[in-house]
């Protein structure tokens, strides 16, 4: 499943719209029921309106009614695999604090971790209301 998810992220990366950073990212998110939702980064001339690949994948999935996720693949053309940005970590933690993360480079290096390892003590729903 890891390799399949990475393949989906590689495909999704081809749709990246990154004319400002030229940093193309692909993501693929696996639901508990085995469905895969993909995303790519989508930049904007008003830079702050840009969205990362991970959030695009998660928002697509949640907007289709998905709530439970088991793994995320992320693909970049970098020397070393990269990890999701801080905003994406917060968004991913809303639905999948234990999410498995497979970050791969186009050259084939894969780093495996979990969201709770790279985003410990997340602020979540349970912190609200006292
Ligand atoms: N980006 C992602 O899509 N995911 C990441 O994990 C890191 C950063 C995007 C945001 C922006 O379009 C470009 O990469 C450079 O930061």
Image (cartoon, helix red, strand yellow):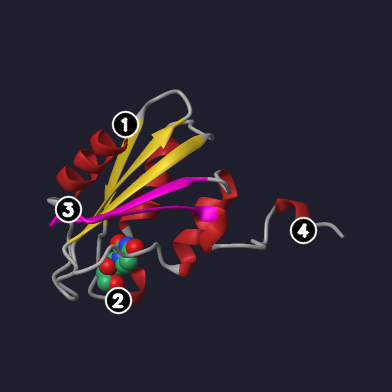
**x and y percentages locating residue 50 in the rendered image:** 31, 67
Q: Position of residue 16 (x, y in %)?
A: 18, 56
The disc label shown at residue 47, or none: 2
User: Which of pointers 3 and 1 lies earlier in the amino acid sequence?
Assistant: 1
C-alpha distance separating marks 3 and 2: 30 Å
Q: How many angstroms separate mark 3 from mark 1 (CA)?
A: 16 Å
User: Mark 4 and 3 residues: CB-CB less than 8 Å, in contact?
Assistant: no
The mark nearer the N terminus, 3 or 2, is 2
* Nearer mark to the viewer, of 1 and 2: 1
Q: Which mark is residue 127?
A: 4
Relative to 128, does residue 43 appear above or below in the rendering? Answer: below
What residue is rendered at 42% in x and 41% in y?
Answer: 71
Where is 124 relative to 33, above or below?
below
Which mark is first along the chain, 4 or 1?
A: 1
Q: Residues within 10 Å of mark 4 (few under 14, many from 20)?
A: few
**Rendered view: 44 above or below 104:** below
């Amino acid at each position: 499943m890891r390799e399949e998810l990475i393949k989906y992220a590689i495909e999704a990366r081809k749709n990246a719209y990154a004319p400002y950073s030229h940093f193309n990212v692909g993501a693929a998110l696996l639901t508990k029921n085995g469905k895969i939702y993909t995303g790519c980064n989508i930049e904007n001339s008003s830079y702050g309106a840009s969205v990362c690949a991970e959030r695009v994948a998660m928002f697509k999935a949640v907007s289709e009614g998905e709530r439970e996720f088991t793994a995320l693949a992320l693909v970049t053309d970098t020397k070393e695999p990269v990890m999701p940005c801080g905003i994406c970590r917060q968004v991913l933690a809303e639905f999948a604090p234990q999410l498995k993360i497979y970050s791969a480079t186009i050259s084939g290096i894969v780093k495996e971790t979990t969201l709770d390892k790279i985003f410990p003590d997340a602020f979540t729903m349970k912190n609200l209301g006292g």
